[in-house]
Amino acid sequence: MSKAPLVWKLYIAAFYIFLFAPLLVVAIFAFNASAFPSPPWKGGTLEWFIGSGAVFGKPGVLMDPIWLTSIGNSLKVAVPVAVLAVLLGTINAWVLERAEFRGKTIVAMMMLWPLVIPGVILGISILAFFSRVANGLEELLQTDLDPLRPGLPLVVLGQLSFILTIATLIIAARLRKFDRSLEEAALDLGASRSRVLRTVTLPFLRPALVGAGLVALLMSFENFNTTLMLVGSDPPLPITMYGQMREGATPAINAVSLLLMLGVGGIASLFALTSKAQS
């Protein structure tokens, strides 16, 4: 029994080494003065972040139009996904927690299906569906419907199909804790339903709304499988990273990974803070 604390300490140490050692190696070699993203270490440099390309033949991440464009594309997808996920997730949560109708349990279960369907299958299904819709509407209207073809708008719809479920669950969990007697008291005092919603209910839901938005941003930025099936000529960051790896990786991959880890870590920290505020 006396050895139990040491065993647990060794286990925890081994777990965190397993978890963070690969990430630490990637972060360190983002500063390696080498044309390859692997050992040996050849000295420190910031060329893979802000270099012009004069040293290694390729510019740093923050100076390379390819990387900057892909980051911008990811933002063009992540921001609409987050906004729509929070807006529609709030409506869905309200329906699931407040409305009473026949088949409510089945509807709630069906909402979880996108979470268990593989992303590749989900992406292919969405692509096939919207391609057929676009073909039919183009024949009917005699016009091109590019938003329904592979591209960023379709990526937004594809990611939203499963991220919305997660946002709904986060908001519904918070709404389930709400004391409805507060709304009834406000109504008894003469407040309108819109004012009760604005001044009582939504302030209570604010931590969940912020948390759902942050999670949606996080999941959108890192999504690969569904995005790969729906992307057009404007690849987001994960698709660009995949393409760069296939062509021959440089430490620029490590630099992008480090920036992504810092961004994701910041978003995750904000979500942890909002989750703490909910409790």
Image (cartoon, rainbow, N blue to C red):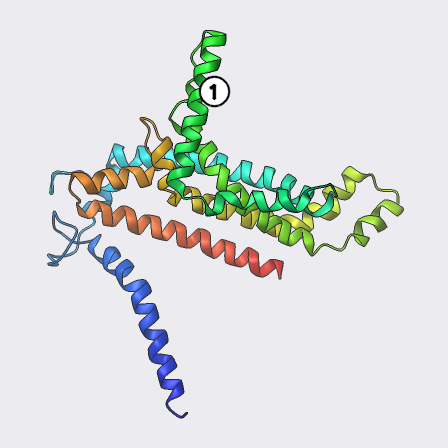
Q: Looking at the picture, does residue 19 appear above or below residue 59?
A: below
Q: Is 137 in front, or is 279?
A: 137
**Considering the numbered disc 1 on the image, is that residue within a helix, a strand or a loop?**
helix
Name the one closer to the observer, 123 or 50: 123
Report x, y in % for residue 140: 49, 9
Q: In this view, does 147 lie above or below 22?
A: above
Q: Is residue 51 visible?
A: no
Name the residue at 53% across, 58% down. 273
Counting from the top left corner in percent of width and height, residue 148 is at 44, 22
Q: Which residue is drawn at 26% across and 32% down?
A: 65
Horizontal side of residue 264 vs 243, given as left or right: right
> Is residue 207 among what the camera can see?
yes
Q: In which quarter of the image is the C terminus?
A: bottom right
Looking at the image, which residue is at 34% across and 70% down?
15
- Tell me the kind of residue under disc 1: Val
Residue pointed to by mark 1 = 133
Please state the horizontal and vertical placement of residue 8, each as a whole percent of the image: 38, 80
Q: Residue at x 19, y 40 (%)?
A: 246
Figure quadrant of residue 138: top left
Q: Quadrant of the N terminus?
A: bottom left
Q: Where in the figure is residue 13, as x and y percent of width and height?
A: 33, 74
Residue 272 falls left or right of residue 43: right
**Residue 222 lies in quadrant:** top left
Q: In this view, does 57 lie to the left or right of 82?
A: left
